[in-house]
Image (tube, coloured by chain):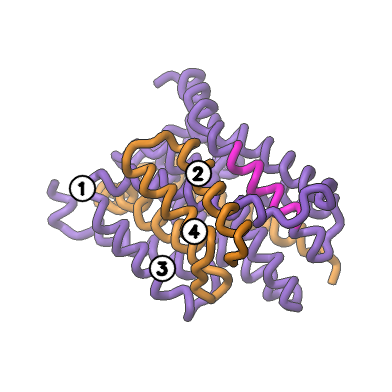
Chain colours: A purple, B orange
Amino acid sequence: MPAPESFRRGLRLGTPFAVAGLLLSASFGVLAVQTGLSAWQAVTMSAVVHAGSAQFAILSVLASGGGFLPAVAAAGLMNARFLAMGMALAPSVPGRPLSRAVQAQGMVDPSWVLADRHDGTFDRWLMFGATLPQYVTFVTGTALGAFGGDLLGDTDRFGFDAVFPTFFLALLIVELRRPESRWVAVVGGAVALALVPFAPPGVPILAAAVTALVGLAPSRVAR
Amino acid sequence: MNLWVLIGVVAVLTVVLRALGPVVLGGRDLPSRFDGVIVLLAGPLLAALVVASALAEGRQLQVDSSTAGVAVGGVLLWRDVHVVVAVVVAAAVTAGLRAVGLP
């Protein structure tokens, strides 16, 4: 697919996730201010980090009285999956190293999944297109929550916390319908579930990603 | 603690984590046997993200109203209901259960 067409397709596919991201980031904005960040700090964090799960992990460390290093470590572990995702993305991102580094910043979970061509390559323009609206609503939602938190109150009341898991579930169900990836997904989920009580947040996700290494098994390569 | 410094450090760390793969490995093809890994990566990653976002609160496994909401959403998705409808229903079920006093 030509780049402009891929980009437009990405915009279209990314828009529902952008709507979900608006709700998620509004919840983040409210919670961040309750946790002691200023509204501008909350908005800045969303603008320069753009990784919801890591940002919530930071808040939970701060809320429980944790210090600087635990907060950084929590965010780092949560985002460590980007290492694996980035390695998968690498062959699909051309250009000089600096250009590749910049392009990699367009990687967020939903866009990475949507851009996956299921043949070992990714449609990078589709990924950029899908990330753009998500970035805009993520920063906007954070501002709404951070500056208007008093009006929103407790966002759990609206069931916002069910929004993102359901979106991830929608993407997962697509994977579960592909026979070749179904069982690895099930095993990965089980590994993550089993590790939650024993490992810091983020590690279960990383461990689940490692189960994809069964793809190295000769029988699979032969297919 | 200076929160601005925290934000800066986390931002740099996240930029590096995103960039590392494409910078170090990019611009050339990986050995073809890694294709098998890349093809499989999305499934377990998504399954883990669902588990972490729906069932985990820090290190605790937490079942609450949102778990029920997400489960209803999942059933709808499995029956090919549009994703936006499934998400709205999931949030509504969660909100409804909380309105009657469940956690």
For the residues labelled 2 and 4, the Cα–Cα distance comes to 30 Å
Separation of marks 2 and 1 at Cα, in angstroms = 28 Å
Discs 2 and 1 carry the same chain letter: no
Q: Is residue A174 left or right of residue B53?
A: left
Q: Are the two marked residues, 3 and 1, in contact with CB atoms closer than 8 angstroms?
A: no
Mark 3 = which residue?
A192
Q: Looking at the picture, which amino acid does disc 4 mark? A: Arg
Give residue A70's position: percent from left, percent from top. Answer: 68, 75
Amino acid residing under circle 1: Pro
**Chain of the residue under the numbered disc 2 shown in the image:** B
Instruction: Write down the chain letter for disc 3.
Output: A
Q: Which mark is residue A81?
A: 4
Q: Decide whether residue A55 is among the magenta residues.
A: no
Q: Check disc 3 and give the amino acid type.
A: Ala
Tell me how many marks there are. Answer: 4
Return the chain for callout 4: A
Image depth: mark 2 or mark 1 in front: 2
Q: Is residue A129 visible?
A: yes
Nearer to us of marks 4 and 1 is 1
Mark 4 in CB contact with mark 1 (< 8 angstroms): no
| Residue matched to label 2 | B89
Pair 2/3: label in front:
2
Q: Residues within 10 Å of mark 2 (few under 14, many from 20)?
A: many
Chain of the residue that carries numbered disc 1 in the rendered image: A
Q: Residue at x 33, y 44 (%)?
A: B78
Discs 4 and 3 lie in a common subunit: yes
Q: Is residue B81 above or below residue A221?
A: above
Residue A189 place in picture, x, y as percent: 36, 63
